[in-house]
Amino acid sequence: MDFLVKLAAELNIDADYTRVAMITFSTKAKIAFYLDSHRTLESVQRAIYGAQFVYGDANTADALRLARESIFIPRHGDRPDVRNLIVLLTDGVGNVAPTRTIPEAEKCREAGIHVLSVGIGMENTAELEELVSDPRNDNVLPVSDFSNLNTVLAKVYEAVCDS
């Protein structure tokens, strides 16, 4: 969670500037908060620390579907004139409904959502390479373990700013 809090601290969190949402996922995906749920950095950081992280399987497909269908919609704070970005943090391949994972990522990209992934402790990043937007090499960020997440903070921030 510290990585997410640090990333949020680098952003200009405000209803008129950067809006963030968060989905947690293991066996099931769950919306922690929407784009319009928080208007200040402090509020976002409290929500991140308050989010429930459940360990288990990786239902990446449902997380991507929820982002596309429930987060990036005007009713929950999406703005049509602002590019949307998913930063997918995962420590495993999608093993719940795995045949839906790549099609869900394709639907996100077709909807104009830029997908970037941070793979934590994953030796094989083939699935991540199929999930992310082009150029693939720039959008898959592997790290050896959770303690090394800060090594990709600048690259994630750059992707957020580019969007």
Image: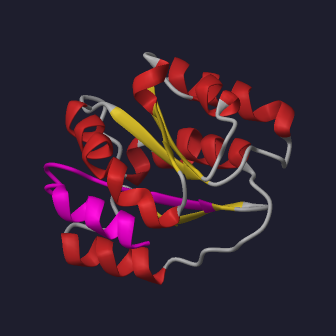
Q: Quadrant of the N terminus?
A: bottom left
- Residue 112 visible from this viewpoint: no
Q: Looking at the picture, does residue 127 appear above or below residue 44?
A: above
Q: Residue at x 43, y 60 (%)?
A: 148
- Residue 163 visible from this viewpoint: yes
Residue 50 point in image, percent of width and height: 46, 83
Q: Looking at the picture, does residue 91 appear above or below residue 103?
A: below
Residue 9 point in image, percent of width and height: 20, 65
Confirm whether the magenta stretch covers residue 6: yes
Q: Residue at x 69, y 36 (%)?
A: 124
User: Which stretch did the figure color magenta?
Assistant: 1-24
Q: Using the image as rendered, state which of residue 87 and residue 15 is in the foreground.
A: 87
Residue 159 point in image, percent of width and height: 29, 35
Q: Is residue 44 left or right of residue 51?
A: left
Confirm whether the magenta stretch covers residue 5: yes
Q: Is residue 42 left or right of residue 56?
A: left
Q: Looking at the picture, does residue 144 appear above or below residue 39?
A: above
Q: Quadrant of the C terminus?
A: top left
The number of numbered discs placed on residues in the rendered structure image is 0
Rendered image coloring scheme: secondary structure
Q: Using the image as rendered, state which of residue 151 and residue 37 is in the foreground.
A: 151
Q: Residue 126 is drawn in which quadrant?
A: top right
Residue 19 point in image, percent of width and height: 27, 53
Q: Residue at x 39, y 77 (%)?
A: 47
Q: Residue at x 76, y 44 (%)?
A: 94
Q: Looking at the picture, does residue 76 appear above or below residue 56?
A: above
